[in-house]
Image (cartoon, rainbow, N blue to C red):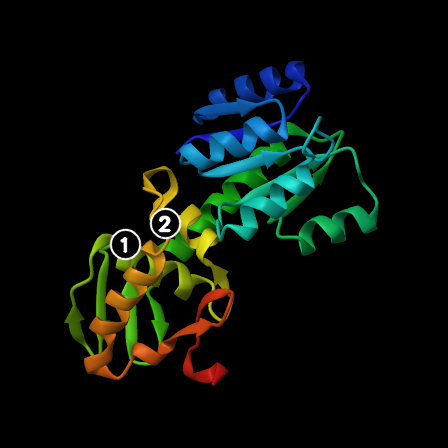
Amino acid sequence: MPLLIIEDNRDLVQVLSEGFAENGFSVDSAFSGEEGLEKISRGSYGCIILDIMLPGIDGLQVLDTVRSQGNEIPILLLTARDTVEDRVDGLNRGADDYLSKPFDFRELVARVNALLRRTADRQHSVLRCGSLELDPVSRECRIDGKPLSLRRREFDILELLLRNENQVFTRENLISSVWRKEYNGSSNVVDVHVKYLRDKLRPFGCDTLVVTVRGVGYKMNCPEYS
């Protein structure tokens, strides 16, 4: 998957794009926060390199929006803001790494490679919640070792909730993360698919793992959080 560079300095974007291309990466770019969010919503990227000081929506607002949608794509903040407070704030808001300008391009490449390896390891691990196991790679679900057949949206909802255990997702978050551009505008589409999912989990006594947070949305409540 390509990298996405969100940076308003076009000369820097060109230099970075050429450098990453020489290291075997494909690169896409955006020059404002708004353009970056639009590309994230309709594209698939391996990592985002994000400047903080952008025109319009700044980089931290982009970061907040991406994380509020449940999107776990690796994000590296590449910025001239270099105080400890800036770094702590960026990391606490969901950035995976932080590199201050000026920087050595070799270090940037190494950091991006590290984030991609970490993501690959996480995606290839089996997700577990009590007796339920979900394999994102083979897209198989098992409960007590018995296979459970799930449709695409059911699987995607369950995977998102499992990856973000005990985190509440609004219906809008789920639509943005699971349906994306395929959303048809149905007001109860999330509730319907969660019902289907629970119906399939119920014979195994696992339907209560998907919890309704009244007036907000849904979360995964694994036994250790009971």
Provide residue 159's location: percent of width, then percent of height. 35, 60
Of labels 1 and 2, earlier in sequence is 1
Residue furthest toward the front? 187
Contact (Cβ within 8 Å) of mark 1 with mark 2? yes
Graded by Cα atoms within 10 Å as few (under 14), some (14 to 19) or many (20 or more), the crowding at tag 1 reads some
Graded by Cα atoms within 10 Å as few (under 14), some (14 to 19) or many (20 or more), the crowding at tag 2 reads many
Given residues 15 and 161, the one toward you in this image is 161
CA gap, disc 1 and disc 2: 7 Å
Given residues 34 and 187, the one toward you in this image is 187
Q: Which mark is residue 178?
A: 2
Mark 2 element type: helix
Q: Which mark is residue 124?
A: none
**Residue located 41% across and 64% down the image:** 161
The kind of residue tagged 2 is Val
Mark 1 element type: helix
Provide residue 172's location: percent of width, then percent of height. 46, 52
Can see residue 187? yes
- The residue singled out by tag 1 in the image is 153
Given residues 203 and 192, the one toward you in this image is 192
**Residue located 68% across and 56% down the image:** 92
Residue 123 appears in which quarter of the rendering?
bottom left
The kind of residue tagged 1 is Arg
Residue 189 left/right relative to 145: right
